[in-house]
Structure formats: structure tokens, C-alpha cells
Image: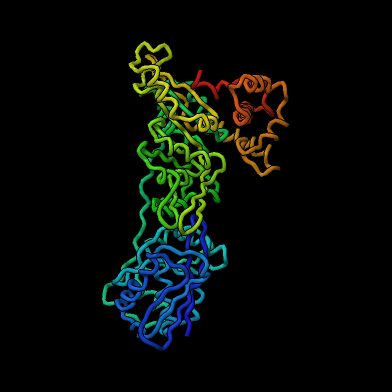
Amino acid sequence: MIGRCRSVVLAGLAGHVIEVEAHVARGLPAFTIVGLPDASLTEAKDRVRAAVASSGVEWPRQRITVNLSPASLPKSGSGTDLAIAVAVMAAAGAVDAGLARELVLLGELGLDGRVHPVRGVLPAVAAAVARGWVRVVVPAGNADEAELVGAAQVSAAATLASVLRALGADASAESEEVVRPHAVAPAPVAAPDLADVRGQGEARMALEVAAAGGHHVLMVGPPGAGKTMLAERLPGVLPVLAEAEAIEVTGIHSLAGTFDAARGLLRRPPIEAPHHTASAASIVGGGSGLARPGAVSLAHAGVLFLDEAPEFPSRVLQTLRQPLERGEIVLHRSHGVTRYPARFQLVLAANPCPCGRFTGTGEQCTCSSTARRRYVSRLSGPLLDRIDIQVAVGAVVRGADEPGEATAAVAVRVANARAAAAERLAAHGWTLSVQATGPWLRRHTSRAACADLWRAVDRGTLTARGFDRALRVAWTLADLQGRGSPGAGEVAQALALRQGARA
């Protein structure tokens, strides 16, 4: 007899619904799992056998073969334990095979029969619903997360015994039933406000332009100038995430194990600020088998902030070039290729020199010219060429005690500018000027307005990529000012913003 049910395995953020088949036949007792399982999934044999015994159900003393279909798809993780146990019990005739066939089951089993939470439940349930499988059984600890997928009919399982009883088995676990935990939403934390930043009018303006157009930013200035404060307040200026974006972002954090279901979907753009000692794998994603998401994916639709950027290893900084261009990260590992979305705004903060006190005259700086050049050169030309806005942040001066404009006021202007860009670009499937192609930008911008950019190209101070990026900033400036297209003034301002930190 063959028992069937379904589960979901994740390859990156993509969920694949698999069929779990169990065959119980005469022969010497054996338990085999086939279908390209990894080591953690192969170990499910011992977990499932012990969990079934702890649930008060007799384990079939026959030859058991479990197939995970499609067999060509590599499978990893312990999230299929519950499905394997139900399929085996259906094949043994201990549960209703017809009921089991309609279910998608997710969960890791403990030796005592408890169903433990697993990562990535949100994208897994969303994948099941997208394929038409709406009846989903998940661990009790993941139930709140699974219910965020509105079309899913979610059942919470605290123990294997409760699942088997619901399917008609005579299961009487010796241990007490575990009650589904009640999620308590934590108290909301007030977002940092731009009003806290004193002075720094040019840097604040650059941050507003970056938020309105989705541009990358480099801030160079001495310690204590407010670079970190500005970067931390950028997410508050950005619009809240749309429904589809919120589900995608929440799914990434669920897969990484950093999602708190009690807070609901992640509606605010996230910010990730890794330490400068972070490895390349932690930034872009990594791990054996299929790669896990890194900081660039956790910052998807939000902000990736690299403080003390020149202190990051050069190898780590160079790994950012692909996601900056493509908006996704592609990771090749032994078990296959994994893709994660990685469309983020990069904010770099740097001191002007190792001691941080270089102001152009060098009067207070203790660094040699060689040390300054070596320090600045850690940010390579190809990386800087992808940074749209580069602004110098001066030291806070005496008298700059008046509070700046609040985040709410800036966010309104940013939202209006983004709405104007989305309306203009809707026919092409774009929402921001940073998504527009170079030919489109040049075709819709007057040649007279681009005169400064062409002169910079002729002098060799601006690359072809830099030309298009400066033009995108000019369009953002025009949107902020309510103009239909940029003129020479916006283009000149965009060029100044691009070269401000190097002036």
C-alpha cells in the first residue's frame, strides 16, 4: 500500500511543492528515503520512528521506502519530517489515506513527538497556496506566520499525536499535549526622526533625493558628524512596502530565522548594518548545500548601511557589484544555484582619512599623504562609479542647535516625487527613475540640459555609467520640484551631488 501527502522544500525564496510517497512492503524491517535528500533529511528516519513510537502508534515492522518527488530536485532541511511520518502511517493503514492526500504538512519532529517550528514557513505556505494546495498543517510555533497568507487554511500542530488523531489514528501520547503558544505583539518602537539631526542641510537634502529616487549614497566626513544618524533615518523617509513587497521581504526574514510573527508582515523598509568584520558569505549569503540569505537580501526593499566602509575587506565590497546592478544575488553551491532578491539602497559612510580629521588643508590631520591615499583607495573605482550621490558631511559647528525638519514632512515630498515618477514610467513597467534604461533617459532629456555631463565625459571625469546615473538623479530632482523633465539646473545639481565627496 502507498500513502501520500505533500510538503514544501525551499530553494532560496522559491518554494517547491513535493509529493511524499511511502510504500510499506513485506520483507526485513528497513527504512529508506530516496529523492535527493541531504544529510539532515536522511536523519529524518530516526526522528520519525522515535516520534511515532512516542505518539502511542505502532511502527510498521516491514520494509518502508519513502520517495520525495520530483526526485531530480535537491531537498534539504528537516521541514518534511511531519509529512514523512503521516505518509508512512497512511501506507501502514493507521490513518485515513484520503485525508492525508489533501494536506500539505510542514514541521520538524522531536523524539518525544513534538512538532518543532522551522524556518521559511511563510514562503513555503505561499508556494503551496499558489499551486492550489490550501489545506496546510504547520507547527504551532509557526501558525501566526502561516496565517499571514490569507488564502491558506492553516491547522496548527503541537504534537504528532494530535495530527494522527485528526486523521483517524488511535494515538495516545504519553507526554502531555503542548498548547499552541499565544503570540503577544511587542510594544512598537519609535522610529528615529530626522528632526534629531542638527545642521547638515546639504547631507539632509542628499538623503531626501536618495529616498525619492532609490539612489545609493556615500557620506564622507569626520567622526561624530552625524553620518550614522542620517543613515539610520533613511528607512523612515521611504514609503511603506506594498503588499507583494511586504510578503517577499517577510519571506526572506522568515527563511533567515529573524522574523517575529507577532509583529505581522514587515511593512517598513528594513535596514541592515553589518559590522566591518563581516565575511563575504554573511553579506551576500552562503552556507553548504543551498546558500542562506545574507545581508544584501535581508536589506531587500530597504537599506544596506556599511559604516566605516573602507574598513571592510576589498573582497567583501566587490561582491556588492552584482546585486547593485541586477537587484538580485545568484549563489552557486554544490547542491545547486540559489537566487535571492537584493534590491536595496546602499549607504556607505567613511572618514576622510584613518585619523578622521582631514579637512582639505590637513592642519589637524596626523596621517601622511600616502596613508590617506591608501585609505581612500579601499573604495574601488568600479564600486564608487555605482554610487549615485557622494556627499561631504562637515563637522557639527557651534550654533547648529535648531531641530531639523521632521521625518514626516520629508516623507510627504518623497512620496509625491515617487508618485510622479511612477505615473511617468508606468507604461514601461518601471516605478523609479533608477530603473529606467540609459537610452530612454537620454532620449527624453534635452541635449542642452546634458551639456555639463557631456563635457565631464570628454574630460574623462565621468564614465558612461556615471552619465546615466547622474541623469537619473537629475530626473529625481525634477520630480521633487514638480517639473516634467530636468533642465540644465537639475543636471548640474546632480553632477555636483555625484562629485561632492571628491570635491
Q: Is residue 50 left or right of residue 215?
A: left
> Residue 325, how many percent across, how many down?
56, 40
Position of 420 relative to 326 (above/below): above
Position of 258 relative to 78 (above/below): above
Q: Compare residues 211 and 109 and report the one nearer the observer.
A: 109
Position of 10 relative to 329 (above/below): below
> Residue 81, how many percent across, how many down?
39, 69
Q: How many marks?
A: 0
Residue 329 seen: yes
| Display colour scheme | rainbow
The residue furthest front is 370
Residue shown at the point (34%, 13%) measured from the top left: 364
Residue shown at the point (37%, 36%) measured from the top left: 276
Quarter of the image holding residue 29? Answer: bottom left
Residue shown at the point (53%, 69%) measured from the top left: 70
Q: Compare residues 277 and 15 and report the one nearer the observer.
A: 277
Residue 412 seen: no
Q: Compare residues 26 and 17 and report the one nearer the observer.
A: 26
> Residue 116, how many percent across, how many down?
35, 64
Quarter of the image holding residue 428? Answer: top right
> Residue 161, how many percent across, how many down?
35, 75
Position of 157 relative to 348 (above/below): below
Quarter of the image holding residue 230? Answer: top left
Q: Is residue 115 left or right of residue 331?
A: left
Residue shown at the point (48%, 82%) measured from the top left: 2
